[in-house]
Amino acid sequence: MISLKMRSLSLLLLLALLVVLLPACAGAPPAAEQPAAEKPATEEAAPPAATEEPTAKEAVTEEPTAPTEEAAAPTEGSGGELIIALEADIVSVDPAFAYDFTTNQVVNQITEGLLKFTNGEKLEPNLAESWETPDPLTYIYKIRQGVTFQDGSPMTIDDIIFNMERIRKPETASYVGWMYTNVDKIEKMDDWTLKVTLKQPDALWQYVPATTAGHVISKAYYEAHQDNFGKPEGGVLGTGPFKFVSWATGSEVVLERYDNYWNKANGGPYLDKVIVKILPEPTTRVAGLQTGELGMVLYAIPPDQLPVVQKMTSIEVSATDSYLNDWVAFNTQRPPFDNVKVRQALNYAVDKAQVTKTLMGDAGVLARAVPVGPRIWNFEKEKWQAAYDKLPAYEKDLDKAKQLLEESGVADQLNGKVITTDESPVRLGQALALQAAAAELGVKLEIQKVTGQELTTLSFSGARDYDIAEAQWGSDFPDPAGNLLPLFHSRNTGDGGSNFANYRNPELDKLLDEQNSLTDNAKRTDLMIQAEQILATESVGIVYDHPRQFMALNKAYTGYSVTPLWYWDAFAKDIKKVE
Amino acid sequence: MGCVPRGDFALFRSFQATHTRGTSAERHSYVSLFTFYVLMLRYTAKRLLALIPILIFTSFVTFELVRLTPGDPALIMVGGRRTSPEVLQNIRQKYALDRDPISQYFFWVGNALRGNLGESFRLKQNVSNLILARLPLTLKLITLSVIISTLLAIPLGILSALYKNSWIDYTSSLVGLVGVSSPVFFTGVVAVLVFGYWLSWLPAFGAGKGFWDELYHLILPSSVLALSMLALTARMTRSAMLEVLGSDYIEAARAKGLPTSTIVIKHALRNALIPVVTVASLQMGFLLVGSVLVEFTFGLGGLGSLITDGIQNRDYPIVQGTVLFLVVMFALLNLATDLLYAAIDPRIRYS
């Protein structure tokens, strides 16, 4: 007979053995284990929970670890860690898949493009020293010499061409591959000169090298890590101010300063480390800012808690007007919304000013009929302003709306569904406002709430299976065409296209194509103004506002405030701890 | 459960131990131990074999169900971004999305048998790597939760049983009720606000590095989870204890003059623990995914958020891979529990 004691003891030992072996069997330790000995609670290195005393005097400045080799000497004022919060996990560290508000925040610090945007407006040299356009189809870039990848290997033109071709290929299924649609050839003129030839003139191509589509990665590194390039195990090798250290999916990404970064012009990079935490719960992000556990939150500040964050004494909130648009698109190919008077009537019925004030407060700038707001007029401002003022504002006018509805001839058959998502109170609120306004007109609109993913699928699918869709769109480029073309050109109505209004107007297409083939911004503006006048009259959608973009940064840091194209900015380079 | 003879047996054993000595008895014990293990292994093998049809069934059902939900994964993969029909076609070919559901299933099974659970549509990573990378955190979280819950619930249950219908009993019922009724995402946020924001005693998010740091980070989320499980365990302990305490052999022990603490801990508790072990293991199984709300609130990258994000994003490979994995985990957990019974209760013999 076995005693109870013996049996249980032996089983317990077995169990203990299993528990010990299990972590070993679980394979390679998650990459988060790797970074060198960190003192526990890395949050300590971030600014102290300065709820009383906000500023510089209290902030702990780490001593710069000045090594003696001149090439690798970090700049004056170096040191410290910054902890940033994202609202979702990044998709990849491969720039080919960096095309959203979350992934870009990480990738932009590791890899960089031939050009860059300053202040979200101006195109400036980066890895390319200069560029010129001898004719509208040819772009010649002079590549900067002496730039090295984060492992010390030199950057060459072969790396650049390799990555551009890689992103172009349909097999890669890169999210930014579409930016190369008009590119015919990418050639090497000599060791330091790159020539890009377009199939037809394209006014927007000039901006592409400043986006992730133009980022440079190491060809050798890619070939050595083909299976897991961009994934946590493989990482990425770029020329940017911070190098990739580790990525624990769903938890955090760790970046370290690259001391041999080529661009020391404005000083920087200063920070030793950037730790990116993934925190889906908005309250946690706000709490983190308050306690000082988080140093920075860009874009992911919950709109309803914005006032709370703005009141925090240890936090500086910077804001900018943006190129984004909050609007509701009518499916212009589907009755009764194919009737222009119906669309105009509904537009006149909604009090957009009131809705914007209630939903956004001053987090949104009221829009006027078209998704091309004042902030995006980066050239020919007076022309744009003059034209803008003449556009119909569609201010709430119930009588006019009723009259238009009668004139439309289809007043009695009016009903439809508005698809929106309740994942964002703003998007839901705008749909509800439309429903309420329509009710005043006697039009019955139903709201269909779907998940953000479903809304995306429906909005981008060629079937355009919806009556009215809540939409958000922001230009990728500091150019009004970046809003007009993707949203309203008929070729973007197919699968994967962003023409949410399903708008097909050959006259508009012609205007948009023509302006895109020109390089003279004045002429382009004239054509675009004509296009937006058509769109305003046609009332293809109800444009509510242009949401402002916000960034919360602990006052112990300084160096960067949010720009309209923050999603292409290598912001971490300029951030440093206040001395 | 909780009938008479077992208690007798334990008492008898303790009597025997104090009055029997001898090497032959010990030698017998070792041989019997061997037999015991052989029996257990046979039983385990049978259970594992039974797992195979279960896996086939669940994987097939999951696979087809997930494909019936609305939403095109190719479009979601490039979601919110522009793309061209060629790229979409490429994506569909790459992930075998253009074939009919049945052949897609066999394509997936073929890979799965070779250990390749496929690549996540959205995260572009190997599903098995994703699961294995996130598993340790989830395991730590649920183990700590069950430990905290059990450490709190068992004493509460015992006290409630001993002082039945007193204020202790009612208070512990109340605590349990509040815990089980409050939604986890609510208590989680409250916990973050109280302990992270106002008191700043504990970190509001993250998992930390190194044993003590991780413990420091996981205490709050585990406590939140434990609170929701407290009621069940405490209640079960209470009723199991009440039943055991009412039995004859306990009366006999009392008659013998044994102190209450000895009776409770040495004799009654061991027997009352069997239903509690059942419940705890079921809760752990549930928590594998149920911890998602806590993961969301505290910014922890565990299995729960992996699978729920996967479902929301129509990330078929993740959903299929994790369901398969969870079925196996759950089955193994149940198997472990049953084996544990065999150790605790000598009457439980498996053929």
Image (cartoon, grey):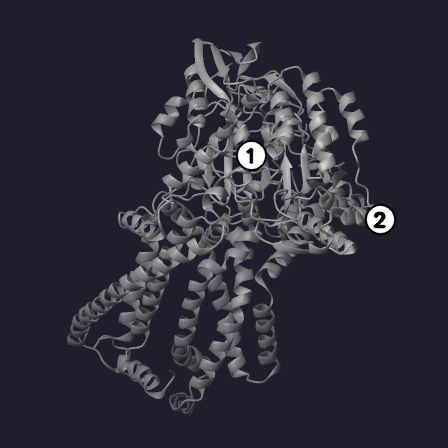
Query: SS for tag 1?
Result: helix
Mark 2 or mark 1, which is nearer the start of the sequence?
2
Say above or below: B94 vs B197.
Answer: above
Residue A318 visible to the viewer: no
Q: Rate crowding at label 2 as few (under 14), some (14 to 19) or many (20 or more) other CA atoms within 10 Å.
A: few
Is disc 1 in the same subunit as disc 2? yes
- Where is residue B83 drawn, in percent x and y? 50, 34
- Where is residue A32 drawn, in percent x and y? 45, 41
Q: Which residue is mark 1?
A: A492
Q: Which residue occupies the foreground of this view, A339 or A232? A: A339
Occupied quadrant, residue A571? top right
- Where is residue B333 drawn, in percent x and y? 36, 64
Identity of the amino acid at label 1?
Asn
- Which residue is found at the position 41% from the left and 16% from the top? A158
* Disc 1 + disc 2, Cβ < 8 Å: no
Report in which chain the residue with disc 1 lies. Answer: A
Q: CA distance from mark 1 to mark 2?
A: 35 Å
B232 left or right of A418? Answer: left
- Which residue is found at the position 15% from the left and 75% from the top? B24
Identity of the amino acid at label 2?
Asp
A155 left or right of B23? Answer: right
Screen quadrant of the C terminus of chain A: top right
Screen quadrant of the N terminus of chain A: bottom left
- Which residue is found at the position 62% from the left and 51% from the top? A419
Occupied quadrant, residue A565? top right
Q: Rate crowding at label 1 as few (under 14), some (14 to 19) or many (20 or more) other CA atoms within 10 Å.
A: many
Q: Which residue is mark 2?
A: A399
Report in which chain the residue with disc 2 lies. Answer: A
Q: Nearer the viewer, mark 1 or mark 2?
A: 2
Q: Which residue occupies the foreground of this view, A59 or A174? A: A174
Count of numbered labels shown in the rendering: 2
Q: Which residue occupies the foreground of this view, B75 or B147? A: B75
